Amino acid sequence: MLNSVILMGRLTADPDYRTTQSGATMARFTLAVERDYAQNGERQTDFLDVIAWRNTADFVSKYFQKGQLVAVRGSIQVSSYTDRDGNKRRSWDIVADQVYFAEGRKDSGGADTRPAHPAQPTTYQPQPYQGTQQMMDGYAPSPSPYQAVADDDLPF
């Protein structure tokens, strides 16, 4: 079975950081996540409750704040309870395993330090291993054991 969730959205408020009676730390926050499709020209937004525990909670409470774009990887947890009126209810929470920065840092003046054109993705250009050229010198590919076949000779 698989229970895995990956989300990206903005925090609707600063994380609520607490310590349980057993001493475990937890951080609760809500992510505003836009849906991929638009209905009548407007995108719908889902507000999802997220819980982070221990080291992840410490990290979230220290580095994240309202309005910040974050990515969360975790799982869905369903809880059942009875409300004050005696009705049985369910709630769904995202239990975060990892929380990541999803935008550039802001400087002390509040200005965003991202590039001027964030819509243009930056591309990663891998650098070859320094010894690659030396390894490739004198290398000749071995002949292929397969022969090219004309389209007319194919059985389909």
Image (spheres, rainbow, N blue to C red):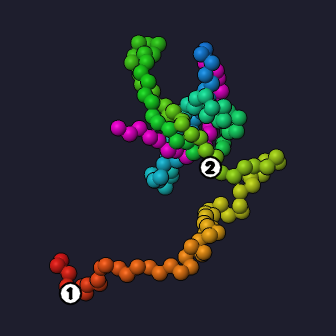
Label 1 crowding class (10 Å Cα cut-off): few <14, some 14-19, many 20+?
few
Q: Earlier in the sequence, mark 2 or mark 1?
A: 2
> Toward which corner of the image does residue 132 lie, by quadrant?
bottom right
- Tell which residue pokes out farthest to the front in this image: 138
Quarter of the image with the C terminus in it = bottom left
Q: Work out how far the residue at label 2 is from the one at label 1, CA to CA, in angstroms.
A: 53 Å
Numbered disc 2: secondary structure: loop
- Return the x and y of residue 118 as percentages of the image width and height: 65, 60
> Toward which corner of the image does residue 123 lie, by quadrant?
bottom right
Which range of residues does the magenta coloring cover?
1-20
* Res. 15 in view: no
Question: Dot 1 corresponds to which residue?
Answer: 152
Numbered disc 1: secondary structure: helix
The kind of residue on which mark 2 rests is Ala
Q: Nearer the viewer, mark 2 or mark 1?
A: 1
Residue at 56%, 79% (x, y): give it. Answer: 137
Q: Is residue 3 magenta?
A: yes
Residue at 55%, 42% (x, y): give it. Answer: 72
Residue at 57%, 40% (x, y): give it. Answer: 98
Question: Dot 2 corresponds to which residue?
Answer: 102
Quarter of the image with the N terminus in it = top left
- Return the x and y of residue 48 as percentages of the image width and height: 52, 36
